[in-house]
Amino acid sequence: MDLSVYNSELSKVNLTDAVSVENYIEEKRKQFNSKIAFGGYLEKRNLYQRSTHFNNESTEERNIHLGIDLWTAAGTPVICPLDGIVHSFNNNTEIGDYGPTIILKHSIKKETFYTLYGHLSLESIENLKIGMPFTKGNQLATLGIAEINGDYAPHLHFQIIKNIGDYRGDYPGVCSQSNLDFYKENCPDPNLLLKIKI
């Protein structure tokens, strides 16, 4: 799914309206007879211009996407891709933000890293506790509706984070051009874990 500034089809889509974007994605999914549309790592997007969370006069515009999006129906289960524990969670309620978000901590062969799951349902974070374990293949969450997930068409934002610093329940999922080198290094391509064949 190409939601980049280079996709001329998006000039006909109202990017400020979650329903319009969802309809566009649904048409694309039907065109390819697909249940899930995916993509977006390091994609430069106009989608964020509607929100002061990414675009305000005092800072450089953030419009480069740092995760992979998996676009499908609200309520769809999110399955844990590998063993981990809950590092943190939060409901990031600003328009254009993640909505309900879970961050897992993983330790493999003495390497520690994190995975972020954004745009979830409220139910996904209701009974969580810091340190709660999740096993690869188990259900972690479900996708949220636009009214809950930051006002987006339903999807999962999945991101790898090497060094999370002091962040809790949140981490930038979109960066500016001037910070791209740092975030590209700290947030490698999530397809390293998902292994989606393109």
Image (spheres, grey):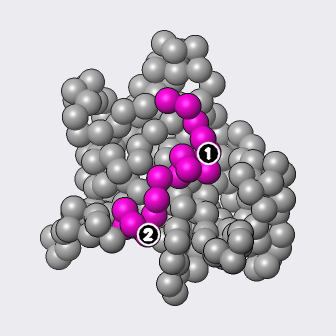
Pointer 1 or 2: first along the chain: 2
Q: Residue at x 82, y 48 (%)?
A: 137
Residue extending farthest to the left is 57
Q: Position of residue 132 (x, y in %)?
A: 82, 73
Residue that carries the numbered disc 2 in the rendered image: 186
Out of 135 and 145, give the one closest to the viewer. Answer: 135
Out of 5 and 12, give the one closest to the viewer. Answer: 5
Left or right placement of residue 136 versus residue 100 in this view: right
Q: Residue at x 71, y 39 (%)?
A: 76
- What is the tally of numbered marks visible in this picture? 2
Disc 2, SS:
helix
Q: Amino acid at mark 1?
A: Leu
> Does residue 114 show up magenta in the picture?
no
Residue extending farthest to the bottom is 166
Residue 103 lies, with reference to residue 22, above or below; the image says: below
Q: Is residue 161 visible?
A: yes
Left or right placement of residue 27 versus residue 144 in this view: left
Stretch in magenta: 183-198
Q: Residues within 10 Å of mark 1 (few under 14, many from 20)?
A: few
- The answer to whether the residues at label 1 and label 2 have Cβ atoms under 8 Å apart is no
Q: Residue at x 60, y 41 (%)?
A: 195
| Label drawn at residue 56 | none
Image quadrant assignment for residue 88: bottom right
Distance from the alpha carbon under mark 1 to that under mark 2: 17 Å
Q: Position of residue 58 (x, y in %)?
A: 17, 76
Q: Amino acid at mark 2?
A: Asn
| Label drawn at residue 194 | 1
Out of 122 and 46, give the one closest to the viewer. Answer: 46
Q: Residue at x 76, y 79 (%)?
A: 130
Disc 1, SS:
helix
> Does residue 197 show up magenta in the picture?
yes
Q: Position of residue 56 (x, y in %)?
A: 21, 68
